Amino acid sequence: MKKIVLVIFTAILLPANMLLLSGCSIINDFFQSESSRQNRQDQTSEGYDDTDAETPNVNTGTSGANLFGSSAVDGDSIKDASDLFSSKDFEADYDENKSVLIKLEGNTATSSSEKVVIFENTVTINDEGTYILSGTFDDGMIIVDAEKKDKVHLVLNNVSVHSSASSPIYIRQADKVFITVASDTVNVLSNGGAFAALDENNIDAVIFSKEDLTLNGSGRLVISSPAGHGIVSKEELVLTGGIYEINSLYHGLSGEDSICIANAEVRITAGKDGIHAENEDDDSPDFIYIQTGTFHITSEGNGISASGQMLIDGGSFDMVCGEEKNDDNSRNVDKSAKGIRAGGNLIINGGSFNIASSDDAVHSDVSVIVGGGLFEIATGDDGFHADDIIRIYSADINITESYEGLEGLHVEVSGGNITLYAKDDGINAAGGNDRSGFGGRGNDNFAGDDEENPQEGSIVISGGELHIKAEGDGIDANGTLSITGGRTLVCCTNKGYTSVLDFDKSGIITGGTFIGTGTSRMARGFSRSKQGVVTAKTDMQAAGTAITLKDRDDNTVISEYVPEFDFSFVILSSPDIVSGNAYVLDVGSSAEEIIAD
């Protein structure tokens, strides 16, 4: 067993124009200690002087230094993700002539090896080596009970094992066990609906391991666990190949120390989490690392959940989590099930994600960093939520349904294409312990509400393409807002007391293109700018009414934009708009000359 105290790391693909710090500094900054994070929060809470600063004192997306400071992680070590797999984890080959054959035959089994003890319907393997299992056990168990130094390799070769009251495969002791699902085979393991105690261990899964466990190969393994989990390792769980179909009452895959997956195809229907890493009995951090693979997860709980950190480098993910519908076909937001959830930091470097969840689609109790990926999201709460920081460098994100699209204490967007629809705020810098509170009705005890230790939120947009459609505020910074680049389109409803822009302290634009429409009731512009800003209150305009901005020479400055909601307020800014110059704002059939601020 490897005891790893780590911060998961791989290279994040960043835009070419982004400043790359030497070595691992951006990851060092991201995976900060609690003390260094608190120091940064103390510094940013000191305030922002709008009179002489160019931008708020937050990260502009070029490095982690502004937000995190330059110190490395206290007490943690940086570990390259490639070290999380051993070469043997991928070895699915075996020599039949050098292996022990075990033939399962109804209610008994046969083997010629002294390493195998067969008593009635129980096969016990007590030594290292490779064991090939074939045949059918109507009601039996395979137990690995070897020396603590032994490595044991099990090969499933068209095996069917049913255990009415325990685990078909129980790994009691070894150094590490490898289970290979042989190519061109279909293997079935099932439990009958009860797990009776055999010893001091609480056996509660179809495959239950007290030791490090790796599954590989290219065959198919079907698991049915109507009374417990699918596969459990009380140490490290690794999948490096194979096709797995798991139907379980509780978690589909569970690893206490860690779960690492590459190349596998995983189909899970689970009454709790689809994939779950949590160590309740050890202070060492658990984590999930997914390098590649195909995942189809339907879960009553979270789709993929780690109480520690999580890193996803790639893969294809199709997840439906807690998606009970009400009679009117709306989502049952009383059921809290997140798509991807990390108790520590969460990094996503790539992959394709189709997530439908009753609670947040992508969530971290600390921070979320996105360096790439394709996302299709429909959620009853936030599309992306972090109690501390959301940082998006590059991704294609389409959030078709959410309560709030992006929510974190600090939200930074420096690249990518983001389209989102929110029933409340499009982007909200509130943070804390899930501000929107599960459809806006849950936990309001978040960091920003702490009167003794208030935390100032921030939103920084320095690049990318954002299309925000919101029934609440388009961009709501409970602190400071800074737009320095990119193209941001905000379409808000003309109902209630909402605003295209809402900020408590300052809202500054120094670059990029901004187009916003909404209600004139709470209309406000930027508090300061380095480029021209055009604002106008209009008569009520119907959704679909085109907006165009031209200069006095009839040159188009902002090409035709068509809001999807009714509106009575327009705000426009771009590097092509010069403060003090006159422009003609065409709204539908009317035109008005306006001097840019």
Image (cartoon, rainbow, N blue to C red):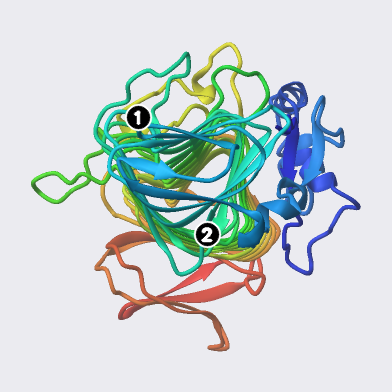
Does residue 414 show up? no
Which residue is at the front of the view, 427 or 3?
A: 3
Point out the tag, 2 or 1, that comes first from the N-terminus. 1
Question: Which residue lies under the disc numbered 2?
Answer: 264
The residue depicted at 42 percent of the width and 25 percent of the height is 203
Counting from the top left corner in percent of width and height, residue 158 is at 41, 59
Q: Are marks 2 and 1 in contact (CB under 8 Å)?
A: no
Mark 2 residue element: loop
Give the structural element (helix, strand or loop) at label 1. Answer: loop
x, y percentage for residue 237? Answer: 58, 40
Instruction: State the residue lying farthest toward the right.
Output: 22
User: Which of these two is toward me, 220 or 353?
Assistant: 220
**What amino acid does circle 2 point to?**
Ala
Q: Please, is residue 399 above or below residue 523 in the view?
A: below
**Is 583 placed left or right of 161 in the picture?**
right
Query: What type is the residue that disc 1 sits on?
Result: Ser
Question: In the picture, residue 56 is in which quadrant?
Answer: top right
Nearer mark to the viewer, of 2 and 1: 1
| Residue sitting at x 75%, y 55% | 87
- Residue 189, given in percent of the width and then of the height, sits at 36, 46
Q: Residues within 10 Å of mark 2 (few under 14, many from 20)?
A: many
Q: With 135 as the anchor, is 385 left or right in this view?
A: right
Left/right placement of residue 347 relative to residue 405 reads right
Residue 316 in sight in this render: yes
Question: Which residue of the protein is positioned furthest toward the left in this rendering?
Answer: 327
Residue at mark 1: 166
Seen as rendered, the residue at the extreme top is 452
Quarter of the image containing the N terminus?
Answer: top right
Find the distance from the CA under tag 2 to the CA under tag 1: 26 Å
